[in-house]
Image (cartoon, helix red, strand yellow):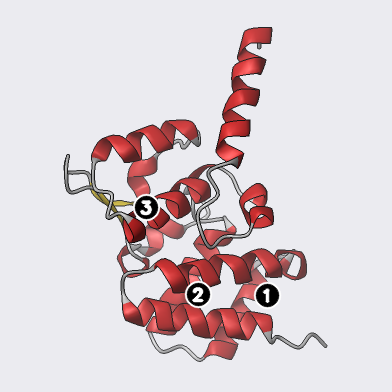
């Protein structure tokens, strides 16, 4: 890596740190990278301005250094581009072999899908605890991601499920 490459990388990281979506804690933004930043930033744009130009998605994917942003896209049509909703993610999209699957955001999407499928909230929380070895350390981030989705999702049932999950995470009693 040359000195110029390092300067460009530092400038990109500085710019990316300023793109915190409205409603997400700065600490959460600093804790995530790549596909998670891309998804949350674009979700914020879709819910606010209804961004649908494919160029927006392509440019943010480059800015956040996302390997394959198409894996989280429901539509790649030029003026009708949009992200997948929580409901539209298939289990193969969220496996550990994908870019988004093993992330905290991927785990939140799986948990929300389970709640939408009427799995008991405590069962969902127990599964998250088992699947995330650093669950206690990740809990503030998981709460913030879930709270963000509860405010930004366009589907009311997803918003409701996210509120339930955020509340359960917040009120979790640790033995």
Q: Which residue is mark 1?
A: 129
Residue 114 in percent (x, y) is at 44, 79
Position above or below: 137 against 74: below
How many residues crowd mark 2 within 10 Å: few (<14), some (14–19), many (20+)?
A: many
Marks 2/1: CA distance? Answer: 11 Å
Quadrant containing the C terminus is bottom right
Q: Quadrant of residue 24?
A: bottom right
Quadrant containing the N terminus is top right
Q: In this rendered view, identify the residue nearer to me: 25 or 40.
A: 25
Query: Which of pointers 3 and 2 indicates the residue nearer the eye?
Result: 3
- The disc, 3 or 1, on the residue closer to the chain's N-terminal end is 3
Q: In this rendered view, identify the residue nearer to me: 108 or 51.
A: 51
Q: Which residue is mark 3?
A: 45
**Residue 99 in sight here:** no
* Residue placed furthest toward the right: 175
**Residue 46 in sight here:** yes
How many residues crowd mark 3 within 10 Å: few (<14), some (14–19), many (20+)?
A: some
Q: Which mark is residue 80?
A: none
How many residues crowd mark 1 within 10 Å: few (<14), some (14–19), many (20+)?
A: some
Marks 3/1: CA distance? Answer: 31 Å
Residue 5 in percent (x, y) is at 61, 13
- The disc, 3 or 2, on the residue closer to the chain's N-terminal end is 3
Q: Which mark is residue 111?
A: 2
Q: Quadrant of residue 140?
A: bottom right
Say which element carries label 2.
helix
Query: Which of pointers 3 and 1 indicates the residue nearer the eye?
Result: 3
- The disc, 2 or 1, on the residue closer to the chain's N-terminal end is 2
Residue 85 in percent (x, y) is at 33, 64
The residue sitting at 50% across, 74% down in the picture is 111
């Amino acid at each position: 890596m040359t000195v110029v490459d390092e300067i460009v990388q530092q400038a990109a990281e500085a710019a990316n740190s300023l793109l915190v979506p409205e409603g997400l804690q700065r600490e959460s933004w600093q804790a995530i990278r790549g596909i998670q930043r891309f998804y949350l930033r674009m979700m914020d744009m879709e819910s606010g301005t209804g961004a649908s130009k494919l160029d927006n998605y392509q440019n943010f994917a480059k800015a956040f250094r996302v390997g394959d942003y198409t894996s989280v896209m429901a539509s790649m049509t030029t003026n009708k581009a949009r992200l997948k909703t929580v409901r539209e993610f298939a289990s193969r999209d969220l496996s550990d072999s994908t870019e988004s699957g093993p992330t905290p955001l991927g785990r939140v999407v799986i948990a929300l899908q389970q709640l939408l499928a009427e799995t008991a909230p405590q069962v969902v929380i127990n599964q998250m605890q088992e699947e995330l070895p650093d669950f206690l350390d990740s809990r503030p981030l998981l709460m913030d991601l879930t709270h963000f989705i509860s405010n930004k999702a366009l589907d009311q049932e997803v918003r409701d499920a996210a509120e339930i999950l955020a509340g359960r995470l917040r009120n979790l009693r640790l033995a």
